[in-house]
Amino acid sequence: MAITVRPAVLGAAFLLLGFLTGCAGGGTPQEAREDDVVEGQPDDAIQPDDCLIGEWLLDVDDYGAQSEAYLTGLGIPITEFAMDGGGILAFGMDGTVALNIDLTTTGVLVAGDSMVPISAPSHYGGSGIWSRPDADVDAVDITEWVTPSSAAAADSDVQVPLPDFAADPRVFVQCSGDQLILQGAEAPFGSSWTRTG
């Protein structure tokens, strides 16, 4: 019988599972980031052919595999790791961005001779404004982010930190055709997305 658990170590381990805490990706190093925002100068206008515009579906298999590798790399003794559900991300040409994540992560924590089944649902949604900070930087800034209280994971015993775009609005992007990778400045790994519309 599966149970939900509340240990601090598990809560820390699942930090990466809530909007991919900064939309985790393929990897622009933190040290390579420069403060390219000039005071009083607006972000570049969104171009009609910007690759980001459209709807994107989270590659759950890839994200689950990276999550498992990350947790085991931290020394979290977990087996039978699985991630089910989905995620949709939409970038509008009008500068709006919306996210809806509905994932459930399961596994078995090994603690000595004990095997503890865990189940961690992560229901999360939000919307805000996106803009290109600089034409020479493969990144977007997310501002005015709003998370409806009904979209947060209130039913989960594992408290997943929500993205804090006020502290750091920058999300690095790699977009080509129907493939997208997102990388938050502090995220430990990436999230891959496939265009659906």
Image (tube, grey):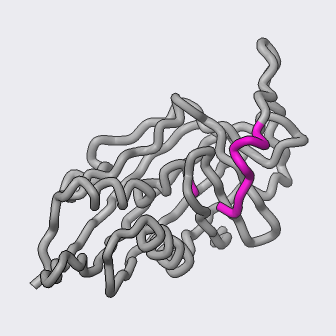
Q: Which residues are magenta?
A: 23-33
Residue 32 lies left or right of residue 124; in this view the side is right
Residue occupying the point 83% across, 49% down: 48
Q: Residue furthest top?
A: 40
Count of residue discs: 0
Q: Is residue 159 magenta?
A: no
Along the line of sight, the residue nearer the viewer: 121 or 101: 121
Give percent across and percent down for residue 156. Answer: 21, 58
Residue occupying the point 32% across, 87% down: 80
Residue 69 lies left or right of residue 95; in this view the side is left
Which quadrant of the figure has residue 71?
A: bottom left
User: What secondary structure is the stretch in magenta mostly built from?
Assistant: loop
Quarter placement of the C terminus? bottom right
Give percent across and percent down for residue 55. Answer: 62, 62
Give percent across and percent down for residue 196. Answer: 63, 72
- 48 above or below 142? below
Residue occupying the point 84% across, 44% down: 47
Q: Residue furthest front?
A: 112
Quarter placement of the N terminus? bottom left
- 167 above or below 88? above
Residue occupying the point 81% across, 28% down: 36
Residue 95 lies left or right of residue 82; in this view the side is right
Give percent across and percent down for residue 22. Answer: 54, 48
Along the line of sight, the residue nearer the viewer: 119 or 153: 119
- 10 above or below 62? above
Residue 141 lies left or right of residue 15; in this view the side is right
Q: Residue furthest left?
A: 1
